[in-house]
Structure formats: structure tokens, C-alpha cells
Amino acid sequence: MDASSPRLQSSRQDGPSLLKALGPGLVTGAADDDPSGIATYSQVGAQFGYTLGWTMIFSYPMMSAVQGLSAGIGAVSGRGLAKNLKLHYHRHFAYGAMALLFIANFINIGADLAAMGAALRLLVGGPEVVYALLFGILCATIQVFVPYPAYVSVLKWLTLSLFAYVAVVLVVGVPWGEALSGILMPKFEFTGDHFTAFVAILGTTISPYLFFWQAGEEVEELRRRKLARLRRNPEIAQPELGRIRMDTLVGMGFSNLVALCIIVAAAVTLHVNGIDKIETSAQAAEALKPVAGEFAFAVFAAGVIGTGLLAVPVLAGSAAYAVAESFGWPEGLDKKLKEAKAFYATIVVATLGSVAVTMMGLDPVRALFWSAVVNGVLATPIIVLMVMMARNPAIMGELKAPRWMVYISGFTALVMGLSTVGMFLF
């Protein structure tokens, strides 16, 4: 593309405004607070009170760096993570990551849809399995048939549902002195419970499906805006990378702020009333009712549905990106159904197939546990491979990731690996 074109001149002069910059990073961060994540944060707040609130600050730079790596790899190379793994490393890396990611996402989607069905039952009554099936059909239909620009707008608007948890914190009367002590003064005990909670938090905030999703979405953003991959256009790289950086920082910050609100809400309502065991997001909403009132209960339950509608398409979409890229199939939500049949078929199978598993009576708590285990096993090697890709000139050209981002991502892989080992040792 000609560097003197009006589009490029405007891009260089104006830089990324906040509203225009927000896109894949915002949606990725919001999708991180899915119903299974809500259950995790609620359990942490109910069991430990405010004492693990500091983990949201601790994980923010790690989450931002890792997601920044994945987004940069997608935008600079013009390819998703699985395709880069297959082309530049051994294809078995791509196949192995794809298989584990699909299994983890399949379980997670089923658990999220079950939580959404349970939340709607709490609000209006009725059969939660039927609700879960209807939510699954809705999510799959939107991804397959709604045009990409409109679909992206829908996802952006759905991020507003996360403000439900900010509203809960505002109405439940938080003792901020005590809460800020837990948030700003790290405390940790070398016990199995603390390690398990810490691994659960890291596994929920830094999940492999988010890596594949954001890389794929950055590729689609280039196509939507009719831009070539950045390594072919280094003259426009800095404005684009600036947009990605702003988008990712805001998206991950929003994600962790909401997660912190959920921990605080559970601590101030459930923990102080002796309720220290929460297994699902719907159970968290139900437990709020007698101690925080009808409004907090209704807002919390509605938030579960809203975040599920945002997260399920991201989970299914990231699995479809990984599968299609691994096998060399046409992929992308900007393509029509007839142009990427296998890609969309993967989305439908991942979404509706997971409902079938839910209808078979699979224990959602156990399902989430094994999903977290698979994500924990997968996250560390995938981050290491992303670091290698981000510094590989064959992939990134002259636009290799900055060293600070590489160092923080490497530290993230180390922390996640050691935490997983600690969980089993203590």
C-alpha cells in the first residue's frame, strides 16, 4: 500500500484515539470475566475475604504483556498463533495446542452455558437446561450469520454488562480501609488452599483461549480496514501498534477491575457472614440474596448472563481459529458461511456440542476444575512459544516485540509454572 495514501497520512498524524482504539483487546479482557471466572473470583472472595485482592494488581502487567504479545504477533505477521506455530515450528506444536485448547474450551463453554441457564432460572424460573440450549443456539447463530462489523459492535456493547459487578460493590457498603489493605498489601500463606486459589486466579485471568482469540481478531481487523500485515508496512506500524497497546491495556485493566469488584462483593457479603464455599456463579448470585438484598442478587445474576453471551462466542471462536489454522482451512468471522464452512462448523460443534455434555449431567464444578487444569498445563508452554515467535525475525521482521514485554511474559510463564507445581506439592 502506498505510504502517501490519505489513510496512512491520517493514521500517522492523528494516532489512535481511545474510542477508535478499543476493539479486540477490550472484548478479550471482558470475555475473561466469563461465568466460570465469576465463580472463581466469588469463591476467592468468599473463602479468603479481601486478602487475595492484591492478585488483581499483580496479574495486570503480566496479563497485558502476554495479550500484547499475542495481538502483536497477529497484526505484524498477518497470521494467527496456530498458523505461525505450524509454519515456523513443528506442526505437532500446533496440533497439540489446538487439541488441548479445543478440549478446555469445549468444557468451559458447557459450564458457562449451564451457569447462564441457572442464572436465568433464578431470575424468572423455568428449566435451566432448556435455557442453556437456547443460549447456545443464540451464540452460535450470531457468530455464523451476523456480519462481522455488526458482530463486533454487539460484543463491544456486551462489555457494558460487566458494570453490573461495579454496581453491586457500590450498593453493598464496603469497609474500604479493610478492603484496600487486602488489595495493596500482599499476603500469602504457603498452603494448598492458597496455592490452589492463586493458580485458579492466574488460570482464569491468563487463559490460552484469549491468546488465540486476540491474535485472530487482530488479523481480522487488518482485513476489515484493508491493511496488509504490519511487517510489510513498517511505516504505519507504530500507529497500529500504539492502537493495539492502548486497546490491550484498557481491556485488561477493565477485566481486572471487574474481577476485583467480584472478589470485594463476595468478601463483604458472603465471607463476613460465614459463607466460604461457592461453586458456581449462579450459586454466588443466590447466596447474595439474603445478605445483600434483591437488587444485588438480580444485578449479579443478570451480569452472569451478559458476560456469558460475550464469553461463549470468544471461547468457540478461539477454538475455531486454532482448528482452522492448524489444518489450513479458510478462517475468519469476516468470511461468509460458504467461504469458511469448516471454520463455522467448528464454532457450532464447540457451542452446541458442549450443551449436549451439560444435558448428560456432567458436574459443572468438576468440569471447570478439569478445564482449569488443562488451561494451566497449556498456558506455560504457549507463552514460551509466543515469546519465541515475538522475537523471531522470520515472523516479525523488524518489528520484534520489545524486550520489556518479552521479560514480563517470560516471568509470567515462570510464575504460572511454579504456582502449578506448588499447588500439587503443598
Image (spheres, grey):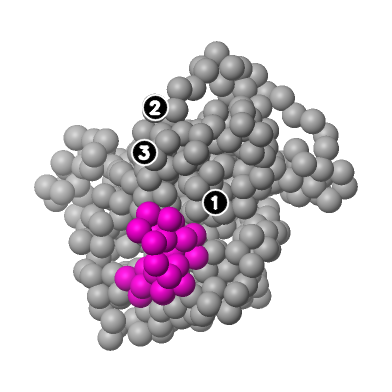
Please indicate whether residue 266 sits to the left or right of residue 234 in the image: right
Instruction: Please identify the quadrant where the N terminus is shown.
Output: bottom left
Label 3, label 1: how far apart the Cα atoms are:
16 Å
Q: Which mark is residue 283?
A: 1
Mark 2 vs mark 1: which is more N-terminal?
A: 2
Q: Earlier in the sequence, mark 3 or mark 2?
A: 2
Residue found farthest to the right: 425
Would you say 11 lies left or right of 302 here?
left
Disc 3 secondary structure class: helix
Magenta region: which residues?
Answer: 114-138
Kind of residue at badge 1 = Gln
Foreground residue among 36 and 62: 36
The alpha-carbon separation of the residues under discs 3 and 2 comes to 12 Å
Graded by Cα atoms within 10 Å as few (under 14), some (14 to 19) or many (20 or more), the crowding at tag 3 reads some
Q: Mark 2 sits on what residue?
A: 170
- Residue 353 x, y percent position in the rendering: 49, 79
